[in-house]
């Protein structure tokens, strides 16, 4: 069966210490397998990448952001993955975003299919995520590095 195409906007909030805000989730089809991933998701019909990034930030963290604070795309990739037993091919666009480290994240606005799957949030440096081995994708530490460089110039 062919994977379902999916276009996403993903956000890399970067704090002044060079850490990126990530979410820990669990795929309902793989209970007990926890992994860290970025904020973001599929574009709604007629929605731009920037609009989706702003919406996803609010839904997944409770944080309202100004779309003009998003950097130009720092990374684009295509990745196949499964979620809840459904196979997808995702076209991902990643934006970085400067953010204070003392934000209050809330899961009160998750969409119903994310409730119970998004479990925690945390600040990660690319090197700490690489050492942890719990990233949703092998190249995620490299993508985080691009976000940190775009926001902090290092």
Image (cartoon, rainbow, N blue to C red):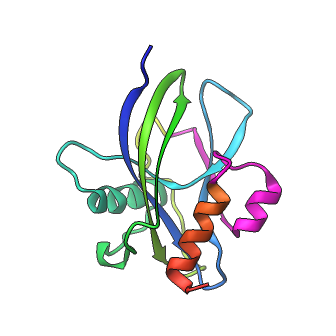
List the single residue furthest toward the top: 1
Q: Quadrant of residue 58?
A: bottom left
Q: Is 67 colored magenta in this rendering?
A: no
Q: Residue 22's x, y, as percent?
A: 60, 59
Q: Residue at x 30, y 57 (%)?
A: 49
| Residue 119 belongs to the span the image colors magenta | yes
On screen, 78 above or below 84? below
Assign the C terminus to one quadrant of the image: bottom right
Is 104 rendered above or below residue 129?
A: below
Tally the marks. 0
Give residue 24's position: percent from left, percent from top.
Answer: 64, 50
* In-image side of 51 versus 146 (left or right): left
Question: Image height check: is 5 above or below 58?
Answer: above
How far across and how far down the image is residue 67, in percent?
30, 72
- Quadrant location of the N terminus in the rendered image: top left
- In depth, the one of 12 and 149 nearer the eye is 149
Left/right placement of residue 21 relative to residue 86 reads right
Residue sitting at x 31%, y 55%: 52
Residue at the farthest right position: 131
Span of residues in magenta: 115-139
- Residue shown at 22% from the left, 51% from the top: 47
Q: Nearer the viewer, residue 80 or 22?
A: 80
Q: Is residue 13 left or right of residue 36?
A: left
Q: Is residue 92 left or right of residue 139?
A: left
Residue for point 36% across, 78% down: 69
Residue at the far left in the pictured view: 46
């Amino acid at each position: 069966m062919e994977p379902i195409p999916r276009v996403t906007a993903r956000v890399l909030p970067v704090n002044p210490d060079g850490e990126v805000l990530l979410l820990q989730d669990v795929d309902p089809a793989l209970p007990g397998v926890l992994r860290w991933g970025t904020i973001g998701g599929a574009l709604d019909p007629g929605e731009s990448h920037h609009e989706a990034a702003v919406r996803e930030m609010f839904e997944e963290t409770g944080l309202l952001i100004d779309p003009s604070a998003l950097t130009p795309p720092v990374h684009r990739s295509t990745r196949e993955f499964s979620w809840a037993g459904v196979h997808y091919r995702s076209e991902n666009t990643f934006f970085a975003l400067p953010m204070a480290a003392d934000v209050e994240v809330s899961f009160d606005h998750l969409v119903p299919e994310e409730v119970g799957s998004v479990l925690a949030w945390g600040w990660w440096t690319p090197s700490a995520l690489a050492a942890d081995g719990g990233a949703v994708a092998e190249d995620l530490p490299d993508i985080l590095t691009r976000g940190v460089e775009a926001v902090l110039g290092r």
